[in-house]
Image: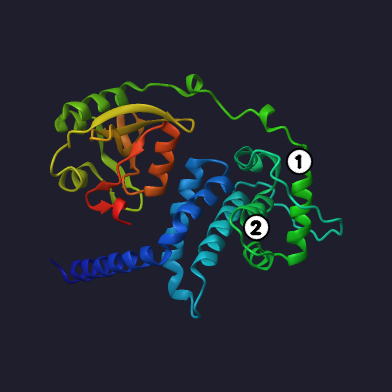
Amino acid sequence: MSSLEQKTLQFTEKSRELRDEFSELIVMFREDLWNYCRYLTGSPWDGEDLFQETLIKAFGGFYQVWQPENPKSYLYRIATNTWIDHCRREKRIIGTLEEIEGPSEEFTDSLETEDALIHLVNLFTPRQVAVFLLVKVFQFKAEEVAGIVKTTQGAIYSTLRRMETRLKKEDFSLIDSGSSEEEAKNQNPVIQTYIKALNNGDLNALFELVSDQLYHEASLGFQEFSKDSMRKGSMQHGLPPYKAEEHFLWGKLVIVKVVDSRMGPLIHDIQYQEVENGKIVYHRSYYFRKEFIVAAAKELKMAPQLDKFPIGWDKK
């Protein structure tokens, strides 16, 4: 092993130790943060991407924090600004938050809260959505939110009043929730063959479907950048005896790996692949993503597997 390789290995091991410490620091905020990202973006898929980017940025940016920082505010600030920056790059209208005098009305729960949260992104600008979620759902104080979204405290109150007035007038039952399952289904023969290989435990057949330059991402777990690294890494012990099923989840066809237990079938992993020129060129696994898998299990009316190697979510 060269000197550079040895230094790289040492740095990797140290970073993993720090990652574990960081995870312990923020563990109590993770579930709420995932939900915030979901409703801020209006999509569990986009929310999951934002959640992951937030954790990576938060972990990587901590060396710049010179004074003790509230971890909760730190995480939500990064998530909010990351999403707003993303919207700016897409040329979306971010909106301004103006201070406008007006009578203060108490927000009531006469509307269905879940319906309101799902449709916020269709009714308001990204900054307005962030303000509503931070104050009304995640219980931040107005002065904290003003710092997070870079505005004044008076603008927070004015924004909330106007949003509450509009939400009371909305009939969420009339808003189309998106494409149907039948519209989204487009079975790819490569994926169908891949599922067959998984269920038969046929590793050779699986590798026949995979590009030599495959990018394999196990979100917030590990990355592999070729078929060879996958063969030597995540697949070195072969295919475990789990059943692979295709399911429609939040507008996307995915592969759900299921393990049997005394409690019935449990979701072991959720995956999706991208196919180009007859080969799988991108493979994404959510094996290490507790918040995502728990939410997906609820959506699919199944139970998540909480005790699995090398993570024991049932013990945390």
Whether 59 is drawn above or below 237: the answer is: below
Q: Amino acid at mark 2?
A: Val
Q: Could you tell me residue 174's position as x and y percent?
A: 69, 27
Residue 17 vs residue 302: left or right? left
Residue 190 vs residue 250: left or right? left
Please tell me which residue is depicted at 14% across the width and 31% down the height of the picture. 204
Q: CA distance from mark 1 to mark 2?
A: 17 Å
Say which residue label 2 marks.
135
Please tell me which residue is depicted at 45% across the width and 62% down the height of the picture. 57
Say which residue label 1 marks.
168
Q: Could you tell me residue 104's position as x and y percent?
A: 82, 56
Please tell me which residue is depicted at 45% across the width and 68% down the height of the picture. 61
Q: Could you tell me residue 293's position as x and y percent?
A: 38, 42
Can residue 278 be seen at all in this image of the molecule?
A: no
Q: Are marks 1 and 2 in contact (CB under 8 Å)?
A: no
Whether 196 is drawn above or below 125: the answer is: above
Please tell me which residue is depicted at 21% across the width and 27% down the height of the picture. 199
Q: Of 78 and 160, which appears nearest the observer?
A: 160
Q: Of 289 and 52, which appears nearest the observer?
A: 289
Res 63 quadrant in image: bottom left
Indicate how the structure is coloured in the image.
Answer: rainbow
Residue 65 vs residue 254: left or right? right
Q: Secondary structure at mark 1?
A: helix
Q: Quadrant of the N terminus?
A: bottom left
How many discs appear?
Answer: 2
Q: Amino acid at mark 1?
A: Lys
